[in-house]
Image (tube, rainbow, N blue to C red):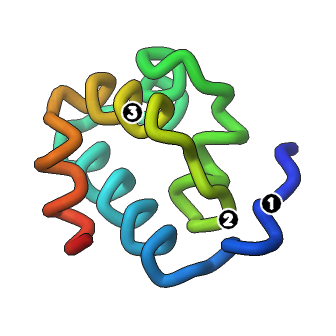
Amino acid sequence: MPVPSPKYALDPALVALGMAIRSTRKARGISQEELAHRSQIERSYMSSIERGMQNPGVMAIVQIAAGIGISVTELVAEAGL
């Protein structure tokens, strides 16, 4: 299990990003495990991102957006950031 990013864990921006990832993923019928595989990210790390416990880097966000099949711009807009 990944260690949370203590400085930013549950920051409103990270929670919003995680919720956007989860809702978009579910709307497209993609399991968390499948998205993690497509994004080349461990499933437990993906779970932490979706719960707002991790502060993912730019490349992780790029990989997740690509795994969902949307642009980073669309993902950020969905999160309201």
Residue 34 percent coordinates (x, y): 45, 23
Tags 2 and 1 touching, CB below 8 Å: yes
Direction bottom: furthest residue: 12
For image coordinates 29% across by 34% down, the residue present is 65
Label 3: state its secondary structure: helix
Residue 65, compared with residue 26, is above or below; it is above
Quarter of the image that includes the C terminus? bottom left
Label 2 sits on what residue type? Met
- Return the residue at label 2: 53
Seen in the image, is 30 located left or right of residue 13?
Answer: left
Quarter of the image that includes the N terminus? top right
Check residue 64 in the rendering and tell me which mark sits there, or answer none: 3
Q: Quadrant of residue 72?
A: top left
Q: Quadrant of residue 17?
A: bottom left
Residue 21 percent coordinates (x, y): 35, 52
Closer-to-camera residue (5/51) = 5
How many neighbours does mark 3 have within 10 angstroms: few (below 14), some (14-19), or many (20 or more)?
A: many
- Return the residue at label 1: 4
Seen in the image, is 44 located left or right of residue 56?
Answer: right
Closer-to-camera residue (63/22) = 63
Residue 37 percent coordinates (x, y): 51, 17
Marked residue nearer the N-terminal end (1 or 3): 1
